[in-house]
Amino acid sequence: GNAVTSIPCGELPNGERFSVKVEGRVFEGRAVRAFCEGRRGELLILCGSSGLIELSENMGSASKRFGLRPGLKVRIEPITKTL
């Protein structure tokens, strides 16, 4: 299953990488417009039909793989590139 957050989509740049922090664990995901843009098993960050950010795993369950459940605090931040 997908995990719907309470975070408004705002400007979610397609293709940008993000860190997703959940209960002290950090995962890397990528913003996409549609599920088909992700690779199998990749953590996807997309704007759902409700206007809120959703976390998904292409061809899998983000809820199971990343231990997501209702009420958890999730922090999503862009990954900045350093030269």
Image (cartoon, rainbow, N blue to C red):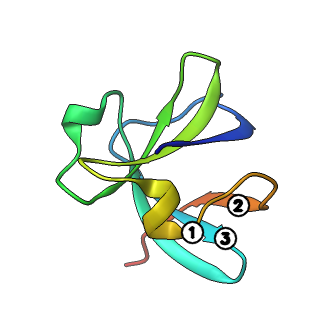
Label 3 vs label 1, nearer the camera: 1
Q: Quadrant of the C terminus?
A: bottom left
Q: Secondary structure at mark 1?
A: loop
> Which picture quadrant has residue 15?
top left
Residue 72 in view (yes/no)? yes
Q: Nearer the viewer, mark 3 or mark 2?
A: 3
Q: Which residue is mark 2?
A: 75
* Pointer 2 local density, CA inside 10 Å: few below 14, some 14–19, many at least 20: some
User: Label 1 near label 3: C-beta < 8 Å?
Assistant: yes
- The secondary structure type at the circle numbered 3 is strand
Q: CA distance from mark 1 to mark 2?
A: 14 Å
User: What kind of residue is marked 3?
Assistant: Val
Q: Is residue 81 above or below residue 24?
A: above
- Disc 1 versus disc 2: nearer the observer: 1
Horizontal arrangement in the rendering, residue 22 relative to residue 13 (left or right): right
**Which residue does the image show at 55% across and 39% down from the upper left?**
54
Badge 2 amino acid: Arg
Q: Amino acid at mark 1?
A: Gly
The percent coordinates of residue 70 (x first, y second) are 75, 51
